[in-house]
Amino acid sequence: MDFLTQTLSGFTAMSHWEYIAVGLSMAYLLLAIKESLWCWPAAFFSTLIYTIMYWNGALLMESLLNFYYMYMAVFGWVVWRKGKAENLNITSWSMNRHAVLISLTTVAAIVIGYVMQNYTHADFAYLDSFTTCFAVVTTYLVAKKVLENWLYWIVIDAASMYLYYEKGYYPTLALFIFYTIMAAWGFKTWYEEYEQSQAKPLAQL
């Protein structure tokens, strides 16, 4: 009950710009699942709002991360628009390729986590570094239409939920519960389309 009360209080305290950013973030997820090119403008403007908000709130790393998301929104728009003309399809990476990606990202997260833990006043330095580093990589996977990006997001969002719960960011926690559910739906939707695309060449033989 206390969680629900604080969550509702948090949503009530949100500014109009925050509501717009949240709405655009949800639109981005829904449109990305449907592989709509318009997911990227939604992502761009939501992260633009977050970039400014976090910068004004002195959360510089979060602001820089969202600035990166803005760049990736432009990159994703270009790739998907070009891919629409060239019939860019959902792809699936091998386990070995994912293993390399996970290993390199983990090393980077540990190094950054060590620096944050020992040279800043950051809370949950390693967990925060892991979610941030993997979010950076996974955003690229979305732009490239790699099927497994949704599995990465499920893990990232679940870890972020714990982080926000411990920090008492209950409205954000509630949003990430929604994001996790949407990521699971996204994987199911993309997987079904990927299976269909793989079956078409076999049916033509």
Image (cartoon, rainbow, N blue to C red):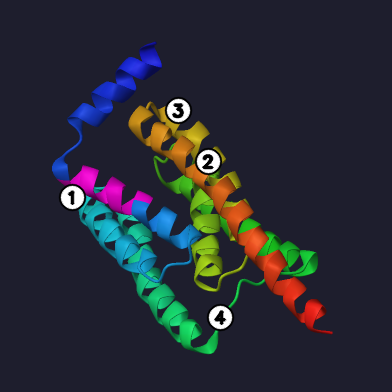
Residue type, numbered disc 1: Asn
The reply to whether the C-beta atoms of the residues labelled 3 and 4 are less than 8 Å apart is no
Percent coordinates x, y for residue 47 in the rendering:
30, 58
Please provide the residue range marked out in magenta. 17-26
Whole-number angstrom distance, CA of label 4 to CA of label 2: 26 Å
Q: Nearer the viewer, mark 2 or mark 1?
A: 2
What distance separates the C-alpha of mark 3 from that of mark 4?
A: 39 Å
Label 3 – label 2 distance at C-alpha: 17 Å
The mark lying in front, picked from 3 and 2, is 2
What separation in Å lies between label 2 and label 1 (alpha carbons)? 31 Å
Q: Residue at x 66, y 59 (%)?
A: 191
Label 1: which residue? 56
- The residue tagged 3 is 165
As drawn, the residue found furthest toward the front would be 204
Against 97, is 132 above or below?
A: above
Label whose residue precedes the other's in the sequence (2 or 1): 1
Secondary structure of the magenta portion, mostly? helix
Q: Which residue is mark 2?
A: 181
Asked whether the viewer can see residue 63, the reply is: yes
Residue located beneath label 4 in the image: 88
Q: Residues within 10 Å of mark 1 (few under 14, many from 20)?
A: few
> Within 10 angstroms of label 2, few (less than 14), some, or many (20 or more) residues?
few
